[in-house]
Image: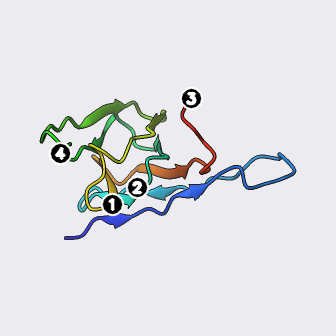
């Protein structure tokens, strides 16, 4: 089955500096999720479940074939952030893939503006 896409939201587009509103979507625990990868994506999660839930960012083989997924147990009612992840080692066919243990995990993908330098 194909992963369920969660489209990235670009922040910082407002010229009046009033902030940005995030759109949250339920994770697809059966099929997993993904988003287009540019190396500027943050995965934000909110665990609305009654217990802790595991969230995993899926790595991709780098030029030496190495992989190392990034996993975190997110407590009930807690928030967590992941990334940004560079394309090398994290992009599979141009997609950043991630999994949540249950559908009560809410996800927002934020893409940093292209002017972001990571410094």
Secondary structure found at label 2: loop
Q: Residue 71, percent across and down?
A: 28, 34
Secondary structure found at label 3: loop
Mark 4 = which residue? 61
50 and 17: which one is in front?
A: 17
Dot 1 or dot 3, earlier in sequence: 1
Q: CA distance from mark 4 to mark 1?
A: 13 Å
Dot 2 or dot 3, earlier in sequence: 2
Q: How is the image coloured?
A: rainbow
CB contact under 8 Å: marks 2 and 4: no
Mark 3 = which residue? 119
* Residue at image location 14% in from the left, 37% down from the top: 66
Q: Quadrant of the N terminus?
A: bottom left
CB contact under 8 Å: marks 2 and 1: yes
CB contact under 8 Å: marks 2 and 3: no
In screen coordinates, is 8 left or right of 33? right
Q: CA distance from mark 2 to mark 1?
A: 5 Å
Mark 1 = which residue? 94
Name the disc covering residue 37, or none: 2
């Amino acid at each position: 089955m194909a992963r369920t896409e969660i489209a990235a939201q670009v922040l910082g587009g407002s010229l009046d500096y009033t902030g940005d509103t995030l759109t949250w979507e339920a994770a697809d625990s059966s099929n997993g999720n993904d988003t287009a990868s540019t190396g500027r994506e943050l995965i934000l999660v909110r665990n609305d479940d009654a217990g802790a839930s595991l969230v995993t960012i899926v790595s991709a083989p780098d030029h030496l074939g190495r992989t190392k997924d990034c996993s975190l147990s997110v407590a009930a009612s807690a928030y967590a952030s992941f990334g940004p992840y560079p394309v090398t080692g994290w992009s599979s066919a141009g997609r950043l893939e991630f999994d949540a243990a249950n559908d009560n995990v809410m996800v927002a993908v934020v893409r940093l503006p292209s002017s972001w330098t990571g410094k």
